[in-house]
Amino acid sequence: MCDSLVALPPATAGKNVIFGKSADCQVNEAHALVRIPRKRHFSGETFRATHIVIPQVEETYEVLLSKSFWTWGCEMGINEHGLAMGNEAVWSTVQNDETVDGLISMDLMRLALERARTCQEAIDVIGSLLKEYGQGGNCELSGNSHFDCLFIVSDTKEAYVLETAGREWSAKRIETIGSISNAFTINDDWDQCSLAVGDGKLNWTATYEEPEIVPLIGSRERQATTYQGLATAQGNIDIQTAFDILRHHGDDYHPAVGDVATNICVHAGPQEYRQWQATGAMASQVSSDGILAWVTGTSGTCVSIFKPVFLGVEMPDIGPVPTERFNADALWWKHELLHRRAMTNFGNLVPAIREDFNALEAEFLAEAVSVLKGTDLQKKGFMDHCFRKAEEATKKWTDRLAARTDLKFEDPAYRNMWAKYNREAGVTDMPT
């Protein structure tokens, strides 16, 4: 499960393009933040994506990726040209037609970010890759999950929804605001389609949607929630709007008993279809002033801090790439020591943590306005400062909660769920 959104001028306050995504993956499926510089490649060079080996192109663009550690591709990202993308799993009527592994959703997105400068180029890249290699192969850390994919693609001027089913695809231009979740949205109103033949217009969703899973994970309700969040702020949408939507919980929500419908900051629960949660989030702002990405690099967006990343500048030191096993030196796992404690008393601890973290984010946002036009050295210093301050704030709260002896999970099923995940990851000394 995931949710992506985009807003274009004139819906935005700063005449910029605002993009955002929450990536929902398995609980111990740690997310890595990776910056890959622009590269020239040798003629005939090949590389291995998640499951298959394919030829490399002559040049790949600089990309910032937020990715599940085990995949070659990414859950969301942005490149040096301001092309931003987010993906969603979707279940189509043809997803099981492939008999061999191909490219998976995350691979397709990284390939588009590395090879395209605009939305149209990204559509062309993905369309050609689908035709040649198809999509197929396991898409989850544990288990054997197969799915097709949807994307929101935005550049400096426009945005599209791009939907795939097997080796086919359709694309629809977004006028001002748009969002997607884990369900097809394009009917016969597509602007481009791999099956554009004759005078008629294929009804894409009616042809390819496998509807059984959609209501189980609240796909349409979550898409309506993100869209309404944008619509309510239309004309004044800024990066803070994206942060707020990505942190949205439904009224009176508690992860031990609540479902996923309307919750964009998804939390795992003990019920069926609740093994996913928000393991990372990204928002970006692209304008004539420059490109600025805001990333959490951590799970539980409601208890995470968005930190700035500039393209063309070396990333701060965030420790080793995390895996499914606890590593006290990795940014993602350091934050888990706070996140998992905060879940013991969700209704009280999350608002208190958020109050502190909001103040810090507000400082970052205010300072970023001038730094965006600064030198690479100023950008590097600002990024290092923000990541360091965010880590200090996180550790302060982690130590505070670790010293408490009263934290415990009241709901037995929720308690057992976290005990299982902690045991599997090697996380010790946590509340029970």
Image (tube, rainbow, N blue to C red):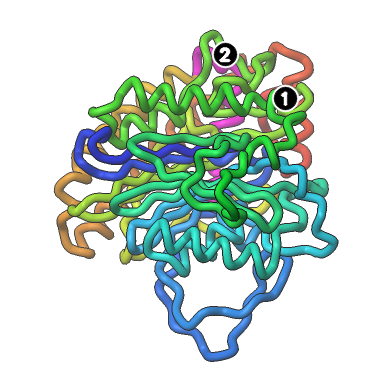
Residue 108 lies in what quarter of the image?
bottom right
- Mark 1, other Cα within 10 Å: few <14 / some 14–19 / many ≥20: some
Of mark 1 and mark 2, the one earlier in the sequence is: 1
Three-letter amino acid code at the position of disc 2: Tyr
Which numbered tag is attached to residue 271? Answer: none
Question: Image height check: is 249 above or below 115?
Answer: above
**As rendered, which of 417 and 194 lies closer to the eye?**
194
Q: Left or right: 308 with respect to 399?
A: left
Q: Can residue 239 be seen in this view?
A: yes
Q: Distance between the residues labelled 1 and 2?
A: 17 Å
Main SS of the magenta segment?
helix
- Mark 2, other Cα within 10 Å: few <14 / some 14–19 / many ≥20: some
Question: Image height check: is 411 above or below 385?
Answer: above
Which numbered tag is attached to residue 216? Answer: 1
* Residue shown at 54% from the left, 32% from the top: 300
- Is 373 contained in the magenta span? no
Q: Can residue 329 be seen in this view?
A: no
Locate the N terminus and report the quarter of the image it occupies.
top right
Question: Image height check: is 243 above or below 342?
Answer: below
* Residue shown at 77% from the left, 38% from the top: 423
Three-letter amino acid code at the position of disc 1: Leu
Q: Left or right: 307 with respect to 9?
A: right
Q: In the image as oriented, which residue stretches furthest toward the front?
A: 199
The span picked out in magenta is: 329-349
Residue linked to disc 2: 253
Residue 134 lies in what quarter of the image?
bottom right
